Amino acid sequence: MSPDDKTTHPDGTPPEPVGAEAPIGDAAPPEAALPAAVPAAALSPMPVRLLMVGTGNMGHLQANGFKAIEGVRLVATVDVSEERRGAFNAEHGVETGFASIEEALAWGEFDAVTNVTPDAVHYVTTMPFLAARKHVLCEKPLATNYAHAAEMAQAAAMAGVVNMVNLTYRNVAALNEAHRLVAEGHLGEIRHFEASYLQSWLTQPAWGEWTTSPTWLWRLSKSHGSMGVLGDVGVHILDYASHAAGSPPSHVSCRLATFDKAPGGRIGEYVLDANDSAVMHLRLANGAVGVLHATRFASGHLNDLTLRLFGTRGGLEVRGSHVSSHLRGSLGRDMLTGTWRDIDCPPVPTNYARFIAAIRAGTGVLPDFARGAALQKVLDLAVASDEAGSIDLAV
Ligand SMILES: NC(=O)c1ccc[n+]([C@@H]2O[C@H](COP(=O)([O-])OP(=O)(O)OC[C@H]3O[C@@H](n4cnc5c(N)ncnc54)[C@H](O)[C@@H]3O)[C@@H](O)[C@H]2O)c1
């Protein structure tokens, strides 16, 4: 993928996320079920005017996701880069653009915000919208540290607005089905898990040349707000594993590694000091233990997520990539012979669809900012553990 390729993105969400078409929770009944006298307009879902902040790589993918939802209109964008903003608006037919969030707030003609800026500015660019009581979908990780993430969660709760973190793999049908099977007790008590998120954009150029592209370079630099692979995709696999296991982490230890990648460890303004590989050992509140790792050096893997969960009554394996996901299990009598079978997974609506549905229904939605903050706390502790020699820390 080149940085300009809008069909997928650095975290590799499927280009056509499962179930994107249909907003959920829309109270309007199907058109065919109503008397002919009711005008079609009366059936339209509540219009939602959306402002996008940050029009880079992921912004394009989000725009396509929101376009698929009836009644949602991307009315304006904000980007500090006039060039990117202009090109984006031309491509997606957006009429209004601003250079700052202050200008957008002064204008005010929108109901909800999707924040697709780099991690470093999620906090400063989200807080003013919460103060203005706008609904916010924020990209992951919610912030660059727990203090900011917790403040964002509290501000969102105080504002009483819909708040959601775009943990994209909640769109994965196999993950949701694994979560359901665990929650309904089909695996018995969860005892053990292993989870990995494998990328390789540092060893091959399938997604573009990282050495010359800001969209990759900021991800390698602490001073640009990156928590390395841990914050970038480690947050996804942490959410993935603990969501499926149905229990939050209670203890964490971690080892991080940053490898030499360029002469003097820098490229232009980017000091390449953020971690490239992260290896964690976790205990969950339900007593299960497991390992979880993420890297950008997994040569041979473009974007592969794997989770294996083992309970007293069965095991599950969730495999996913940027194109598909797959669930198989060894449950009940199959455990006696170590037989594994494929499990059908019903489609799930996208985060975009669920965010809009929550606005229309006036309800909350998960994963919310509180979940984003809880994950951020674990990430912060993982860094602290690594700095202290990989000691075990209570969450
Ligand atoms: N959920 C996912 O699966 C997923 C996938 C990819 C990226 N992301 C997240 O999306 C976010 C953006 O990533 P990206 O790859 O699109 O980055 P990018 O660098 O390609 O784009 C970011 C854009 O934000 C703009 N920007 C920077 N500071 C700004 C500010 N203060 N106000 C307005 N605009 C500003 C930049 O000019 C740029 O156009 C990151 O937080 C990243 O972690 C999430």
Image (cartoon, rainbow, N blue to C red):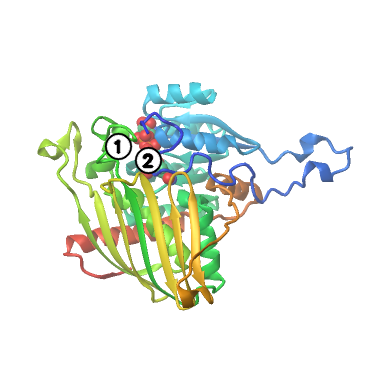
Q: Is residue 117 above or below residue 188?
A: above
Cα separation, mark 2 vs mark 1, equals: 8 Å
Question: Residue drawn at (43%, 58%), measured in percent from left and top?
Answer: 240
Q: Residue at x 52, y 72 (%)?
A: 331
Q: Which kind of residue does numbered mark 2 sit on?
A: Pro
List x then y, in percent, for residue 187.
50, 73
- For mark 1, what is the residue? 216
Q: Are marks 2 and 1 in contact (CB under 8 Å)?
A: yes
Residue at mark 2: 10
The crowd level at tag 1 (other Cα within 10 Å; few <14, some 14-19, many 20+) is some
Dot 2: element: loop
Q: Quadrant of residue 388?
A: bottom left
Q: Quadrant of ligand 1?
A: top left
Name the residue rendered at 54%, 33% in the picture.
108
Q: Is residue 154 above or below residue 114?
A: below
Residue 270 is at least partly visible in this image: yes
Secondary element under disc 1, as helix, strand or loop, is helix
Residue 337: x and y in percent read 47, 75
For label 2, count other residues whose C-alpha is less than 10 Å away and answer few (under 14), some (14-19) or many (20+). Answer: many
Q: Residue furthest left?
A: 264
Looking at the rendered image, the quarter that the C terminus falls into is: bottom left
| Label 2 lies in ligand 1 vicinity (Cβ under 8 Å) | yes
- The answer to which of marks 2 and 1 sits earlier in the sequence is 2
Residue 131 is at least partly visible in this image: no
Closer to us: 17 or 98: 17
Side (left or right) of 177 relative to 3: right
* Residue at the image point whose x is 19% and y is 53% from the top: 257
Q: Is residue 23 left or right of residue 395?
A: right
Query: Which circle marks residue 2 in the picture?
Result: none
